[in-house]
Image (tube, rainbow, N blue to C red):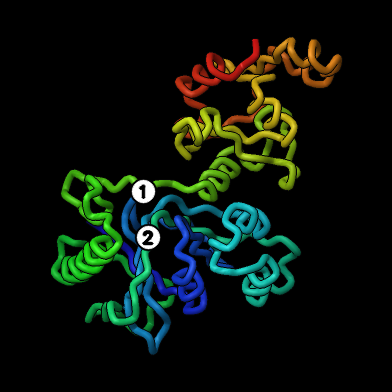
Amino acid sequence: MKFYIGVTDDSWFHYLARIKPDEVNFWRPRDKSNFKVIQEGAPFLFKLHSPNNYIVGGGFFVRHLFLPLSLAWDSFEFKNGAPTYDYFRESIMKFRSGDGLNPTIGCTILAEPFFFKRENWIPIPSNWSKNIVKGKSYSTNEEIGANIWRQVEERLDAQKYREGELAVQEPATRYGNNYKMRARIGQGAFRAMVTDAYSKRCAVTGERTLPVLEAAHIKPYSEAGPNLTKNGLLLRSDMHFLFDKGYITVSGDHHLEVSRRIREEYENGKEYYAYHGSKLSNLPENLIDRPSPAFLNWHQEQVYKG
């Protein structure tokens, strides 16, 4: 198994260690390159800046995205490692002066983060160079990597024991040659991934104004719908409301259907009926991110007021 040790801002780590969120955004203000070092689901460990040369926690890699600063905050809020938007923005703009009001930043999204207490911090590997600025990958097929991951597992197992979680089947800390960790993707990651997959445009109207765009679940999270892009649509806020209430739906071949109930109940809806029968104007380029026919069928049968 390949994992990554990333150099981590001390204040970012200590703030998140206090609140223990279910997901985090490991952001870099000037990141311009895709992070392809590890596979989705692989561990991403935190190493503090020198002189605190220790591995202090980690999470599980979900996706690397380039997001406008405002969208990163709207998606993750305090899970960005900052208590307020102003603090978050100031932390970035001190590295991005002159780059506009809403610069794009690199966002490495991590699920199920964990934070070790001071007495459980792990010394950095013997081959860690002082010149490393961002991080370094390791493999459990090599002695150094195997030793680091063994120590991480020991601490995670002890932590889960204290919290009474060891009875969970297939715990996230266990990896075999044929086992890939399936991290529980959070709501922030869902919003960010759906917005990115749809290139920041409404699937129906093509609207590009970010504040009015919302990531809609096709099958709601409350109904066991997963936080996956194939269970999402990026919709303008009014379209999102109508979709959730069953006044509109999307067919398996990606055509919009508008219920007659809008006219019957509200004696209005001319703007929305103009979209009836039209193909979605915007879909993800990546086929695996496009709406799942199974989820669309669920919405048509369980929600739509046809």
Q: Is residue 82 above or below residue 104?
A: below
Q: Which mark is residue 59?
A: 2
Q: Secondary structure at mark 1?
A: loop
The residue lying at 53 percent from left, 61 percent from top is 79
Please tell me in which quadrant of the rendered image residue 132 appears.
bottom left
Check contact, mark 2 vs mark 1: CB within 8 A.
yes
Q: Amino acid at mark 1?
A: Ala
In this rendering, position of residue 283 left or right of residue 265: left
Please tell me in which quadrant of the rendered image residue 271 appears.
top right
Q: Where's residue 297, x and y in %?
A: 50, 17
In this rendering, position of residue 161 left or right of residue 83: left
User: Can residue 138 be seen?
Assistant: no
- For the residue carrying disc 2, how many other residues have a C-alpha within 10 Å: few (<14), some (14-19), or many (20+)? many
The residue lying at 75 percent from left, 44 percent from top is 209
Q: Where's residue 23, x and y in %?
A: 46, 56
Q: Which mark is residue 183?
A: 1
Q: Is residue 127 above or below residue 236?
A: below
Q: Which mark is residue 284?
A: none
Q: Where's residue 88, x and y in %?
A: 63, 69
The residue lying at 51 percent from left, 78 percent from top is 11
- For the residue carrying disc 1, how many other residues have a C-alpha within 10 Å: few (<14), some (14-19), or many (20+)? some
Q: Is residue 33 above or below residue 271?
A: below
- Spatial separation of the CA atoms under disc 2 and disc 1: 9 Å
Q: Where's residue 233, x and y in %?
A: 59, 32
